[in-house]
Image: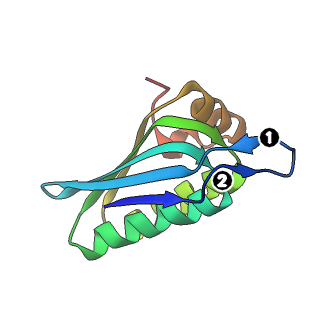
């Protein structure tokens, strides 16, 4: 399943942003969500929706990989944290990474490294 959220759009700061690509696959009992592009408000919702779909498909553990994320804001990070909460509430395990240095910096600035895992790959 591949989901593209938006196209190249002009953000409020005048900078063009790339659409987020969300690709989900299943590896046994683990669901893998691979992200690339810009993780913002729409992207955060898409990550959470992808995780919910994987859980509904019987996945116990979810790994979100963000090596292709070029931009992340607080809304995108909020979506990742909501996805993590959904998995944990369902009794599963949530893994976040590998990730880009950009994503790692935002996680560190937000103070949620202990929730989202190891440093950038």
Q: Secondary structure at mark 2?
A: loop
Residue at x 42% of width, y 37% of height:
97
Front in this rendered view, residue 102 or 38:
38
30 over 87 or under it: above or below = above
The CA span between labels 1 and 2 is 13 Å
- Which residue is farthest right? 13
Q: On the image, which quarter does residue 16 sit in?
A: top right
Q: Quadrant of the N terminus?
A: bottom left
Q: Which residue is mark 1?
A: 15
Residue at x 60% of width, y 43% of height:
112
Q: Which residue is mark 2?
A: 40
Q: Are marks 1 and 2 in contact (CB under 8 Å)?
A: no
8 over 46 or under it: above or below = above
* Residue 15 falls left or right of residue 51: right
Local crowd at mark 2 within 10 Å, few (<14), some, or many (≥20)? many
Tell me where residue 38 appears, x and y as whole percent: 61, 45
Front in this rendered view, residue 121 or 4:
4
3 over 21 or under it: above or below = below
Give the mark nearest the N terminus, 1 or 2.
1
Looking at the rendered image, the disc whose residue lies closer to the viewer, 1 or 2, is 1
* Residue 64 falls left or right of residue 44: left
* Residue 116 falls left or right of residue 19: left
Q: Is residue 90 visible?
A: no
């Amino acid at each position: 399943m591949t989901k593209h959220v938006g196209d190249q759009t002009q953000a409020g700061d005048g900078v063009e942003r790339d659409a987020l690509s969300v690709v989900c696959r299943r590896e046994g009992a683990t669901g893998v969500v691979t992200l690339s592009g810009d993780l913002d408000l729409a992207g955060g919702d898409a990550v959470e929706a992808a995780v919910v779909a994987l859980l509904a498909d019987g996945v116990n553990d979810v790994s979100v990989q963000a090596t292709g994320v070029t931009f992340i804001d607080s809304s995108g990070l909020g979506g990742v944290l909501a996805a993590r909460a959904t998995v944990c509430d369902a009794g599963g395990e949530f893994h976040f990474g590998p990730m880009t240095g950009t994503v790692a910096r935002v996680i560190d600035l937000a103070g949620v490294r202990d929730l989202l895992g190891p440093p950038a790959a």
